[in-house]
Image: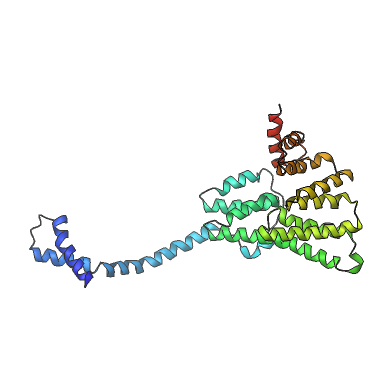
C-alpha cells in the first residue's frame, strides 16, 4: 500500500519536473510514470539476475591473472639466498609492502623468505591484518612454518636430553635453551607465552650450569635471557661472569648500556654507547651508537 501511494505521488510530480510543457492528456502521462515507478523493483531484480554471469566471468579472469601462491605447499618453499642483482633489504620490502597493489604486497611477503627471521617476522605480523585474504594466509603460513621448524628441533633435542646417558650433555642444554630463546628473540611468541618460553630456556641453561658453572657460552646466554625477562641485576652479574670467563668486553657493551638505561644511569649509558664499535655490532645498535658518537664530538 505504501509503495502504491508513493508511486502515485511520484507519477503526479515527475511529469511537472521532467516535461511540464508536454501536450499529452494528464491522465496518460500519470499512468505512464506510475507504471514505471511501480515496476522499478521488478526491473531491478531482472537486471541483477542478468548481471550475475558477467560478474562471475570477470571474477574468473581476475583469479587467472593473479597467479596465487599455493599455500598448501608453503612448508616446502625454498629459503635459498637471493639471486644476484636483486635487492632484498628489509627497508625495500617494507616499502614494497606499503604499495596499494595487492600483487606487490604479496610479492613482498614472499620475498621475506630471503630475510633473516628477526627482520622478516615484524613484516609478517604486520601483514596478518592485510585486507587481502591471500596475503593474510601466506603471512600466517610463513610464521607457522618458522615456528614449526624451531619446535621440531626442540622436540628432537628434548628426546635426546631425556635419555639418561645424555642428561649432562652441555651441548644439548645449550641448544634447547638457544632454540627457546630464538622463539622469543625473533618475535614468534609474545606476551605470557614469551615469558613461559624464556623461563623454560632459563631452566635448561641453569641445569647446564650445575655441571658446567664456568662455561662462558652458557653464562652469556643466561644473561641474555635474564635481560629479556627484565631481571637487570641478575643479568648484569651473568654478563660480568661471562666477561671474566673470556667473552669480549666490546661484544657486551650494548648489553651493559641497555642495563644502565633501564637502571636510569644515563651518564653511564651515554659513555657506554659512545664506546661501541660501529663496525662490530648489528645495524640497529650501530645506528643508535652512531648518534651517541656524534653527541660526544
Residue 103 x, y percent position in the rendering:
54, 53
Q: Answer left or right for 204 relative to 142.
A: right
* Quarter of the image where one finds residue 281: top right
Vertical order, 276 against 226 (above or below): above
* Residue 278, image quadrant: top right
Q: Position of residue 203 (x, y in %)?
A: 81, 60
Residue drawn 90% across the image and 54% down it: 213
Residue 97 image position (x, y, % from top left):
57, 49
Name the side, left or right, on which 292 lies relative to 216: left
Q: Where does the image place residue 173, in percent across and percent down from the top left? A: 85, 59
What residue is at 72 percent from the left and 35 percent from the top?
A: 267
Quadrant in which the C terminus appears: top right
Above/below status of 247 relative to 127: above
- Closer to the camera, 7 or 108? 7
Colour scheme of the picture: rainbow
Left or right, 188 with reference to 97: right
Q: Quadrant of the N terminus?
A: bottom left
Q: Residue furthest top?
A: 297
Instruction: Tell me which residue sits at (71%, 63%) in the image.
Output: 148
Q: Residue furthest bottom?
A: 1
Q: How many marks?
A: 0
Pick the residue in front: 105 or 276: 276
Amino acid at each position: 500500500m505504501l509503495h502504491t501511494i508513493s508511486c502515485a505521488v511520484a507519477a503526479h510530480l515527475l511529469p511537472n519536473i521532467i516535461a511540464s510543457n508536454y501536450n499529452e492528456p494528464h491522465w496518460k502521462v500519470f499512468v505512464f510514470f506510475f507504471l514505471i515507478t511501480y515496476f522499478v523493483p521488478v526491473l531491478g531484480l531482472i537486471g541483477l539476475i542478468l548481471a550475475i554471469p558477467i560478474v562471475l566471468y570477470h571474477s574468473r579472469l581476475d583469479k587467472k591473472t593473479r597467479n596465487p601462491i599455493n599455500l598448501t605447499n608453503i612448508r616446502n618453499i625454498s629459503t635459498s639466498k637471493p639471486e644476484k642483482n636483486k635487492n632484498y633489504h628489509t627497508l625495500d620490502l617494507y616499502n614494497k609492502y606499503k604499495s596499494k597493489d595487492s600483487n606487490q604486497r604479496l610479492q613482498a611477503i614472499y620475498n621475506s623468505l630471503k630475510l633473516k627471521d628477526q627482520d622478516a617476522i615484524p613484516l609478517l605480523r604486520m601483514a596478518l591484518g592485510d585486507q587481502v585474504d591471500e596475503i593474510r594466509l601466506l603471512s600466517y603460513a610463513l610464521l607457522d612454518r618458522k615456528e614449526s621448524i624451531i619446535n621440531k628441533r626442540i622436540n628432537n633435542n628434548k628426546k635426546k636430553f631425556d635419555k639418561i646417558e645424555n642428561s649432562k650433555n652441555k651441548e644439548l642444554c645449550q641448544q634447547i635453551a638457544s632454540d627457546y630463546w630464538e622463539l622469543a628473540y625473533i618475535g614468534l611468541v609474545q606476551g605470557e607465552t614469551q615469558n613461559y618460553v624464556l623461563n623454560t630456556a632459563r631452566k635448561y641453561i641453569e641445569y647446564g650450569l650445575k655441571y658446567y658453572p664456568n662455561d662462558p657460552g652458557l653464562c652469556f646466554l643466561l644473561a641474555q635471557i635474564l635481560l629479556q625477562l627484565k631481571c637487570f641485576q641478575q643479568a648484569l652479574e651473568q654478563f660480568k661472569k661471562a666477561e671474566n670467563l673470556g667473552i669480549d668486553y666490546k661484544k657486551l657493551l650494548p648489553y651493559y648500556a641497555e642495563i644502565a638505561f633501564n637502571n636510569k644511569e644515563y651518564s653511564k649509558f651515554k659513555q657506554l654507547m659512545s664506546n661501541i664499535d660501529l663496525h662490530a655490532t648489528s645495524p640497529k645498535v650501530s645506528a643508535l651508537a652512531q648518534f651517541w658518537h656524534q653527541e660526544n664530538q
